[in-house]
Image (tube, rainbow, N blue to C red):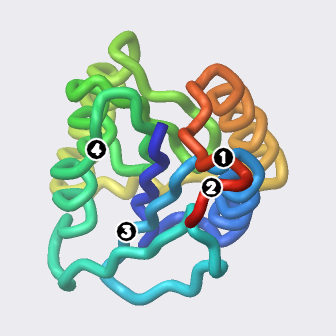
């Protein structure tokens, strides 16, 4: 499993959880953003900077994700595309997007966009909380436990 992160709007605390998970499990982690981000020096972790522009990080992730990968995103349209490609999508709040719920979430998002475009103030999501952080960490841990282990060189193999 490769973990991809739609990193521009991903909370720092979630990135920290992902950094530790990648280092602990050896799972490759790629953060994609339109601005440079600091990432730990690790062979499992890399940062891809895409050009500024609407949905450039989303396009990059969608173009590189493979069946069985995991994408961390709060972007419902990106999550829908990821699920359609056979990968998993997880929100920074720990909500797993799947075939059974993505259509409803996409419809709700589109409905809220329509309301906002007519001038209705819909408010935003609740502030990110410790409970959200814990829900994300728990869900990520469960997903990583069932994922196949990444291939690692033998301890005495040349690197």
The numbered disc on residue 65 is 4
Of pointers 4 and 2, the one earlier in the residue sequence: 4
Q: Position of residue 53 (x, y in %)?
A: 16, 79
Q: Position of residue 36 (x, y in %)?
A: 42, 89
Task: Residue 98: tell me if it is visible.
Answer: yes
Q: Is residue 71 left or right of residue 43?
A: left
Q: Nearer the viewer, residue 158 or 69?
A: 158
Q: Which mark's residue is nearer the viewer, 4 or 2?
A: 2
The numbered disc on residue 32 is 3
Q: Residue at x 40, y 20 (%)?
A: 98
Q: Nearer the viewer, residue 2 or 124?
A: 2
SS for tag 3? strand
SS for tag 1? loop
Residue at the outermost top position: 100
Q: Which mark's residue is nearer the viewer, 1 or 4?
A: 1
Is the C-beta separation of discs 1 and 4 under 8 Å?
no
**CA separation in Å, label 1 and label 2:** 5 Å
Q: Which residue is mark 1?
A: 154
Of pointers 3 and 2, the one earlier in the residue sequence: 3
**CA separation in Å, label 4 and label 3:** 12 Å
Mark 4 residue crowding within 10 angstroms, few (<14) / some (14–19) / many (20+): some
Is the C-beta separation of discs 1 and 3 under 8 Å?
no
The numbered disc on residue 10 is none
Image quadrant of residue 41? bottom right
Q: Up-down: is 43 above or below 39?
A: above
Q: Up-down: is 7 above or below 129?
A: below
Mark 3 residue crowding within 10 angstroms, few (<14) / some (14–19) / many (20+): many
Q: Residue at x 61, y 32 (%)?
A: 149
Q: Up-down: is 105 above or below 154?
A: above
Of pointers 4 and 3, the one earlier in the residue sequence: 3
Is the C-beta separation of discs 1 and 2 under 8 Å?
yes
Q: Which residue is mark 2?
A: 157
């Amino acid at each position: 499993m490769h973990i991809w992160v739609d990193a521009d709007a991903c909370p720092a605390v979630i990135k920290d959880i992902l950094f530790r998970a990648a280092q602990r499990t050896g799972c490759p982690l790629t953060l994609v953003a339109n601005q440079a981000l600091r990432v730990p020096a690790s062979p499992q972790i890399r940062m891809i900077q895409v050009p500024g522009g609407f949905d450039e990080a989303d396009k990059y992730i969608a173009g590189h994700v493979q069946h069985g990968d995991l994408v961390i995103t709060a972007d419902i349209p990106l999550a829908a595309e990821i699920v359609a490609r056979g990968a998993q999508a997880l929100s920074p709040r720990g909500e797993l997007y799947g075939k059974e719920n993505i259509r409803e979430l996409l419809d709700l998002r589109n409905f809220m966009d329509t309301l906002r475009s007519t001038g209705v103030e819909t408010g935003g999501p609740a502030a990110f909380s410790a409970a959200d952080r814990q829900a994300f960490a728990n869900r990520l841990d469960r997903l990583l436990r069932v994922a196949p282990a990444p291939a690692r060189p033998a301890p005495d193999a040349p690197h």
